Image (cartoon, helix red, strand yellow):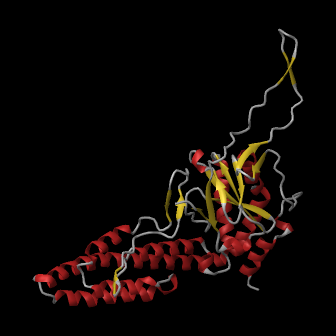
């Protein structure tokens, strides 16, 4: 067994050497907050208070009023979400829980960043590039590029495929949703679409065929094909007539090819990012033992600080019902959304508040359009 594999197994399965003294692996008891299953709302459970207050004027006993710990949410204010967890879901010992917090202190924010970075370095230590968060980002950006090419004309008519994603992300304050594929490359779609009907149908079909089934693993081949197609159609377009219908097509082809040159450059930049991730994997493989020792020290001395803070300060706690979370994000101003995952003998926390995160692959996705 390679050392990197041993490191990963020790982390996921658990090791007593990594567990703080006196800790147990049983479920934690939360006596202050409970989830209402019927309405998916938070209801406070105030502790009993036997203290009394004596009114000096009337000499009567009046109970001391209890201030609510936090505001409860009312029925009908929740929205439905799910969480994308691959490829790390295989390490889960139980279904993840989502916590909502009004904010994080500066110290806990730094601890959370440290924990996410260390967890990534161990969970991604297998050497498989597709298990790294950076790979997930590359796949999503490739999806953006593929959407930027409109459908070509077919025998059954013109394909009006629009620049639309397959699902949406939620904004950090819950006020709106935004596309998985974003708007980074939508400008190319607009340019291609504007000249699509006037340009040569064979040009559009050729480009669509090249990009449609592209994957991260064959970027070299797709880039080469795009560059070859640009050279071929530049020659064909240059000898076209300047007049009549052919002149209109020639002008449209030139506009299409001009945008295509920049578009192909995006593929080259994506390929360079892939190379950097591959180099990063090679460099980190030499630091596996150091990372494990760093993680042991963090887990022993710092991880419980994050857990205690989350339990004391969360405003809402939600488990998944058929992979769906009901969250009242619309009632909170820029909340912190944390995913709590039980991996091995410990619970780790991952920030879902800002869509993509460089240190984990998890995404909070709105199920409501």
Question: In the rendering, at what x and y percent does residue 182 appear?
Answer: 45, 65
Look at the picture and state if 10 lies above or below 340. Answer: below
Picture quadrant where residue 283 is located = bottom right
Look at the picture and state if 255 lies above or below 24. Answer: below
* Residue at the far left in the pictured view: 243
Task: Specify the quadrant that holds the N terminus.
Answer: bottom right
Question: In the rendering, at what x and y percent does residue 238 appear?
Answer: 17, 87
Q: Nearer the viewer, residue 275 or 95?
A: 95
Exactly how many numbered labels are in the figure?
Answer: 0
Picture quadrant where residue 4 is located = bottom right
Residue 252 in the figure: left or right of residue 30: left
Question: In the rendering, at what x and y percent does residue 290 appear?
Answer: 71, 71
Q: Residue at x 69, y 41 (%)?
A: 72
Residue 227 in the figure: left or right of residue 139: left
Question: In the rendering, at what x and y percent does residue 12 appear?
Answer: 77, 72
Q: Nearer the viewer, residue 37 or 179?
A: 37
Q: Residue at x 51, y 81 (%)?
A: 216
Q: Residue at x 79, y 44 (%)?
A: 32
Residue 314 in the figure: left or right of residue 264: right
Q: Residue at x 75, y 44 (%)?
A: 43
* Residue at the far front in the pictured view: 156
Look at the picture and state if 251 lies above or below 61. Answer: below
């Amino acid at each position: 067994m390679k050392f990197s594999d041993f490191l990963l197994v020790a982390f996921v399965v658990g090791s007593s050497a990594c567990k703080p003294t006196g800790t147990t692996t049983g479920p934690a008891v939360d006596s202050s907050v409970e989830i209402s299953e019927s309405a998916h709302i938070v209801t406070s459970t105030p502790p009993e208070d036997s203290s009394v207050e004596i009114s000096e004027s009337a000499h009567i006993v009046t109970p001391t009023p209890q201030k609510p710990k936090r505001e409860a949410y009312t029925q009908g204010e929740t929205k439905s979400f799910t969480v994308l967890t691959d490829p790390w879901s295989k390490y889960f010992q139980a279904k993840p829980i989502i916590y909502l917090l009004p904010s994080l202190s500066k110290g806990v924010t730094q601890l959370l960043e440290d924990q996410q970075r260390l967890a990534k370095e161990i969970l991604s230590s297998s050497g498989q590039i597709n298990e790294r968060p950076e790979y997930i980002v590359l796949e999503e950006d490739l999806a953006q590029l593929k959407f930027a090419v409109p459908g070509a004309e077919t025998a059954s008519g013109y394909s009006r495929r629009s620049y639309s994603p397959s699902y949406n992300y939620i904004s950090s304050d819950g006020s709106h949703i935004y596309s998985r594929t974003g708007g980074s490359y939508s400008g190319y779609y607009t340019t291609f679409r504007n000249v699509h009907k006037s340009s040569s149908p064979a040009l559009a079909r050729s480009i669509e065929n090249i990009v449609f089934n592209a994957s991260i693993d064959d970027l070299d081949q797709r880039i080469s094909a795009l560059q070859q197609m640009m050279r071929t159609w530049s020659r064909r377009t240059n000898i076209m007539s300047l007049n009549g219908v052919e002149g209109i097509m020639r002008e449209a082809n030139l506009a299409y090819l001009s945008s295509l040159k920049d578009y192909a450059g995006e593929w080259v930049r994506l390929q360079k990012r892939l190379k950097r991730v591959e180099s990063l994997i090679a460099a980190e493989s030499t630091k596996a033992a150091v990372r494990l020792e760093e993680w042991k020290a963090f887990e022993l001395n710092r991880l419980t600080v994050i857990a205690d803070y989350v339990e004391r300060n969360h405003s809402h706690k939600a488990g998944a019902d058929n992979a769906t979370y009901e969250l009242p994000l619309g009632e909170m101003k820029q909340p912190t959304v944390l995913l709590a995952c039980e991996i091995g003998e410990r619970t780790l926390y991952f920030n879902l508040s800002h869509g993509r995160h460089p240190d984990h692959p998890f995404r909070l996705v709105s199920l409501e359009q």
